[in-house]
Image (cartoon, grey):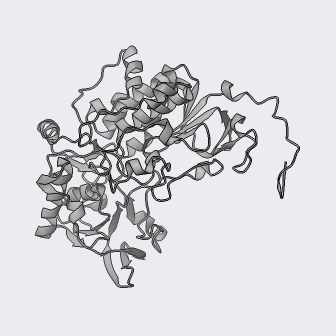
Amino acid sequence: MSGCCGPTAVELEPSTQAARPDELPIVVIGAGPVGLAAAAHLAGRGLDFVVLEAGEQAGASVARWGHVRVFSPWKYNIDSAARRLLEADGWSAPDAEWLPTGAELIDDYLAPLAKLFGDRIRLGAKVSAISRLGYDRVRTAGREAAPFLIRLADGSELHARAVIDASGTYATPSTLGASGLPARGESDAADLVDHALPDVLGADRDRYAGRHVLVVGAGHSAATTLLALAQLEDTPITWAIRAGDAGRAYGGGEADALPARGALGTRLHAHVTTGRIRLVTGFFTHAIERDGDQVRVISRDPSGAEQTITAERIVAATGYRPDHAIAGELRLDLDAVLGSTRALAPLIDPNAHSCGTVPPHGADELAHPEPGYYAVGVKSYGRAPTFLLATGYEQARSVVAALAGDWEAARDVRLDLPETGVCSSSLAEAQEQRVGLATGISGGLLGTPLPLATAGAAQGGGCCG
């Protein structure tokens, strides 16, 4: 019990029915690439675990961008522990130099890996909250000895000795509003707004063909969507950005250290120059007004000046953000800007780092004041768009080593990447001869056949694609 002046002298005895923390499994949240990598490392160390996946399949978020080709080749997309487990089961790795689509990533890697774990993976298990059994965020005495309490959306609960949160950020895209808040009226026009990476040239083609489309955002996912839309005849395209010019989005062209980024920007610049894409600068989305099957999108800049764009569909390529709400009763130390851990933030700051210059990091940089809780993968990066799968795999290896008590291995963090990340124009050009053209997109992905013969990087608006 606790009173107005703090805990009383009386402490409740722990339930005799509660298992000791060391008898409980480690819970992994999310059965995406990094979550399954964590599971593979746990299995390799003989640690009991359960994977909770909100979707109905392993890699459920990946499936939503299954038409997109990832920026890095297979040799960077397969975790070492996962490879060992799969090969022991008779699996053969895909071509190491091939750039897989999201669908191929699932079919040729994630699904076979998940199958090995059997009922340790629980599908349709959405986590709604994490706490300590019998402890809110304020209570300290005995906290570290208390098991984690994980509550699911269906009301069921389970206990864990530790939690590895690899739930990602794909389900929490940023809003259209320029101030970080939803634009006024944004929810009323939700059926006319799509978030980043729609399948413009495939399954979603009918939603865009012949309609005036507004793309909001200056990242590489916006660029990819714009280049895809440009291939649809009789489809007017408007591109709205907050900046005064699109120089940053265009990148360095042929001089860009990341070939895909430079080539992507060069093609985009050409479409703007010819008028195929109408560019509107200084656009700060403030409100959306629905008018039948159209929407008026109103910008209001910091000085109060307004401008309006009328369109039939909107693609909000405004990035992603982490949702730490489920860990609201845990003690987190989050960077005020990025939403990563405070120790990790300076290592991944997109103002100073590209995906290829982020230094190796592991359990120490990912630790919170709440012992036993780690966020890994793209969620660990907060709002930084510099994440690569290979980085997430090393995070998972280090964290699992720490949970196993092997701190020497946990702190021996290494990352073998080319200087510019995993960016290779020659690789993309070679693949182009086999499957057609591809383009780099936000956060390490490559779009499906588009008019650009170079490569890009990882999910969420990243530096490498």
Nearest the eye: 93 or 395: 395
Residue 74, percent across and down? 28, 31
Q: Is residue 170 above or below residue 124?
A: below
Q: Is residue 219 shown to the viewer in this render?
A: yes
Tell me what residue is drawn at x 48 percent, y 70 percent. Answer: 188
164 sits to left or right of 70:
right
Q: Is residue 63 above or below residue 84?
A: below
Tell me what residue is drawn at x 18 percent, y 40 percent. Answer: 424
Tell me what residue is drawn at x 11 percent, y 68 percent. Answer: 274
281 sits to left or right of 193:
left
Q: Is residue 415 above or below residue 199?
A: above
Nearest the eye: 132 or 240: 132
Residue 194, percent across and down? 38, 60
Q: Is residue 292 shown to the viewer in this render?
A: no
Nearest the eye: 200 or 386: 386
Residue 198, percent across and down? 32, 54
Residue 96, percent across and down? 24, 28
Number of dots carrying numbers: 0
